[in-house]
Image (cartoon, rainbow, N blue to C red):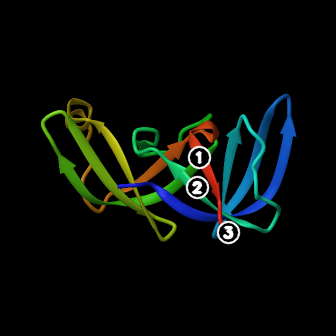
Amino acid sequence: MKNEFTATVQEIKSAQGSTLTYFLLGDIPIRAITLQPPVGLAEGSEATLIIHETRPVLSSNPLEGMANTLLGDIERIEEGEMLTRINTKTAGISLSVLTDTQTFNASSWIIGQKVYISFKATDVAIEANQ
């Protein structure tokens, strides 16, 4: 499952060879930091944001120090021998989180549970929408 969704560019700042882009996913702010300037992006334009499913962290409470945190519900759990995929629904989009099964078994995640899905600004890839 690909974790990708469309968000609107609010602001773009560049300094020291990095670019910080602020997005809105509905009314939820999302930050992304890239090492290259965003080609084809401008304030008010839309972009597809992609987060690899090994990057988000699930928690029962918001995590400090994470740039982006979404509140969602666990929809489905696909437990495997080595890896477990936890599918969530948040802000009208589906996001999956992939973790090792041993860590999953040590948790208390269940379907329908409210969770915070957090990820760093450097974990977001950006594709400009045409």
Q: Residue at x 23, y 33 (%)?
A: 106
Which kind of residue does numbered mark 1 sit on? Ala
Q: Residue 18: x, y in percent? A: 78, 34
Q: Could you give the CA–CA distance between mark 3 and mark 2, rounded to whole angstroms? A: 14 Å
Q: Which quadrant of the figure contains the N terminus? A: bottom left
Q: Counting other residues with Cα less than 10 Å from the Cα at mark 1, is it few (<14), some (14-19), or many (20 or more)? A: some
Residue at image mark 1:
125
| Mark 3, other Cα within 10 Å: few <14 / some 14–19 / many ≥20 | few
Nearer the camera: disc 1 or disc 3: 3
Residue closer to the observer: 11 or 117: 11
- Observer-side mark, 3 or 2, equals 3
Q: Dot 2 surroundings within 10 Å: few (below 14), some, or many (20 or more)?
A: many
Q: Amino acid at mark 2?
A: Leu
- In the rendered view, would you say 122 is above or below 7? above
Left or right of 23 in this view: 53: left
Which label sits on residue 130? Answer: 3
Q: Position of residue 84 (x, y in %)?
A: 23, 42
